[in-house]
Amino acid sequence: MMNKNSFELYVHIPFCKQKCYYCDFLSAPADGEQIAAYREALLREIRYVSAQIRQAENGQFGTVQSVFIGGGTPSYIPEADIAAILAEIRRQFMVEPDAEISMECNPGTLTPQKAACYREAGINRISLGLQSTDNACLARIGRIHTWETFLESYAICRETGFDNINIDLMSALPGQTLAEYLIGLQQAADLKPEHISAYSLIVEPGTALEAMLANGQAAPLPTEETEREMYEQTGAVLRQQGYHRYEISNYCRPGKECRHNCGYWNRTPYLGFGLGASSFWKETRWQNESRLQAYLTEAGNRDIRRNPEQLSEKDRMAEFMFLGLRMTAGVSAGEFLAQFGVPMEQVYGLVIRKYRDCGLLKEDGDRLCLTEAGINVSNYIFSDFLLE
Ligand code: SF4
């Protein structure tokens, strides 16, 4: 159970060796000078935000239960920079002794020296971006690595002693068949990672892939029916391999849920550092400056928060429902009552009955959760929890 005074930290590293064709994250290639300038800005920002909060909270602001270094490709920058960032975090915040400290790595950017440095710095969970085990498919989406490179990176992590590894996989990729996808899923599961995230590709506007599909340069996407099959069979295959689904797209061995992501779904407060990073603090959500040059100049020197949004009571109730229902454990009626002082049934009785009666929601004691069928249409259900 989460400590009430705990919060989370996210650190964004917006650099990658090369842009994948489908990517719409804040990430781009960079030279050594830019990376060094970014590290300095990040360190300044960590100090600045910690001082601001310490002042606002009279020096009492709880402890850090998890840190997630994401990107981009954090393993692309010098390992000493990662160690320096974590050291600064430990100087400025109280990181709990058993905090989950995750970092995203991409195959092709990891070495034994880097992995050893990450462990030394306290990182205890590695998330590896595989996406597909099929080399032709990886090339079609602009990944920099092959399946073999991935295997080398995975071995490096294990040999360095990492015992909590996530593998990211994607389905519905251009030219991907159901059979190819299932082979890849099996190959990934055979490695026995503690955690697998399996997402369907979404072709985002403005990406290279969108243009390639429009002008016929990319292999066609699987049909909707194939995509649904991929999605449904993912659960079945991974269940057979001893993984349990704890969130719409996330599977793990017992006890290996990603605590950081569970924090997002449980509405645990978090502070985001880095370009475009988002934060959720005191029921306010905001995003950092997302233009690199402005970030480099302003971070740590002035307020770089953009579009802060103070959530209303209705926003908070809606978030409680649609974020909590992402997890297979669902939401607790008791917690709803404790947080909002009104029974869940009184606010959402009609919606709950509607979806329970058609088998998309179910109750289990105090908890309300999506059924298997409900998970497949979750976005549609979630929109009904928004309050006017
Ligand atoms: S590695 Fe990830 S962040 Fe970097 S370009 Fe590819 S998808 Fe985007």
Image (cartoon, helix red, strand yellow):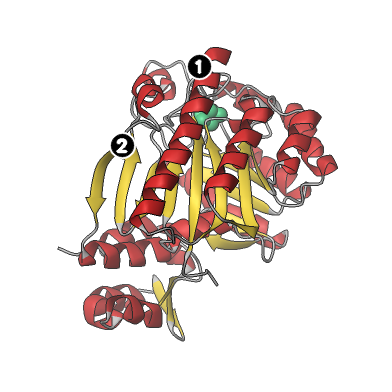
Q: Considering only vertical position in the picture, is 57 above or below 175?
A: below
Residue drawn 56% across the image and 21% down it: 142
Does residue 226 appear left or right of residue 312 in this picture? right
x%, y% of residue 121?
70, 41
x%, y% of residue 5?
47, 66
**Furthest residue toward bottom:** 365
Say which residue label 1 marks: 34
Residue 8 visible (yes or no): yes
Distance Cα–Cα, label 2 vs label 1? 21 Å
Residue drawn 21% across the image and 62% down it: 312
Q: Quadrant of the N terminus?
A: bottom right
SS at mark 2? loop
Residue 221 visible (yes or no): no
Residue drawn 76% across the image and 28% down it: 111
Say which residue label 2 marks: 303
Label 2 Cα neighbours within 10 Å, binned few <14 / some 14-19 / many ≥20: some
Indicate which disc, 2 or 1, sits on the residue closer to the N terminus.
1
State yes or no: Cβ of the residue under disc 1 lies below 8 Å from any atom of ligand 1. no
Task: Indicate which label's residue lies in the foreground, 2 or 1.
Answer: 2
x%, y% of residue 15?
52, 24
Residue drawn 38% across the image and 34% down it: 276
Q: Quadrant of the C terminus?
A: bottom left
SS at mark 1? helix
**Callout 2 amino acid:** Asp
